[in-house]
Amino acid sequence: MKAAVCALLLLCGLVAHAEPLAQHYEFHATHDPDGIGKFYLGREIAHVMGPGGIIWLERSERETEEKPQLVIDALEIKPGQTIADLGAGSGYYSFRIAPLVGPTGRVLAIDIEPKMLEVIAERAGREHVTNIATVRSSERDPNLAPHSVDLLFMVDVYHELEYPYEVMRKVREALKPGGRVALVEYRAEDPQVQIKPVHKMSEAQVRREMQAAGFRHVTTVRTLPLQHLILFERDGA
């Protein structure tokens, strides 16, 4: 009898833990064709950009359209830091940040697509860049060691995470004390930003989702032409 009660209590505990996670996501049969039909806190998750998007990521117009140097300046990267570029794609930002962390720092270029990581590794070898390491992520886990990262950033990536809550909880564990997270997303509030709706996010939605994953808003950089850059840290809870 005692064993049965203990088993029941354990089962109830597991259900109580699983239920809040299940409530994060909804699935709708009718949805935006550019989304996957899965919704997180009211927002539809977008399809992931595959290797075919490298041409878009490396387009020459990106310098003038998005002003990536403004993003890099706002991140306040220091020599010796470990910086994680989650959803690194072709390494567009990873290679710009590598010189800033210097020989004692590291850039972790993380992506779920093996082809993207191959492109980054081949370029790093060709250009003799030794402080960029590639990391294969999964849908739920960026595969980072606990307390190993000074800054993790995502540029136009977060809205594509199939399991945003689970990924961000892992990110939270990976941050060093005082570590930060920076999300760059196309502004959903601005009708002049000509990007498909599911590939844009409002600042309010970003902050809502990050709070749910255990982060506290630090500041929002509003000087980018098309995007907002929103910085967070662990909430301490």
Image (cartoon, helix red, strand yellow):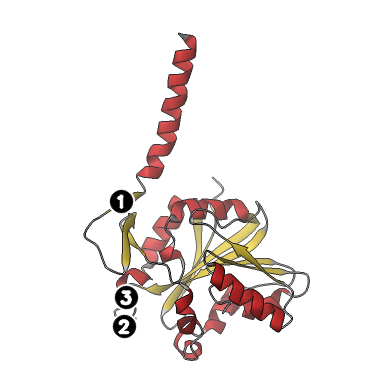
Whole-angstrom CA distance, mark 1 to mark 3, is 21 Å
- Residue 196 lies, in percent from the top left, at 32, 75
Observer-nearest residue: 163 or 76?
A: 163
Q: Residue at x 41, y 65 (%)?
A: 159
The residue type indicated by label 2 comes to: Gln
- Residue 143 lies, in percent from the top left, at 60, 56
The residue type indicated by label 3 comes to: Lys
Looking at marks 1 and 3 on the same chain, the residue that comes earlier in the sequence is marked by 1
- Check disc 3 and report the residue beneath it: 196
- Check disc 2 and report the residue beneath it: 192
Whole-angstrom CA distance, mark 2 to mark 1, is 29 Å
Observer-nearest residue: 234 or 4?
A: 4
The residue type indicated by label 1 comes to: Glu
Residue at the far top in the pictured view: 1
Q: Residue at x 44, y 36 (%)?
A: 17
Looking at marks 2 and 1 on the same chain, the residue that comes earlier in the sequence is marked by 1
Q: Quadrant of the C terminus?
A: top right
Residue 142 location, quadrant: bottom right
Circles 1 and 3: CB distance less than 8 Å? Answer: no
Whole-angstrom CA distance, mark 3 to mark 2, is 12 Å
- Residue 140 lies, in percent from the top left, at 49, 53
Residue 141 location, quadrant: bottom right
Residue at the far right in the pictured view: 104
- Image position of 115 (left or right of 227): right
| Nearer mark to the viewer, of 3 and 2 | 3
Residue 26: which numbered mark, if any?
A: 1
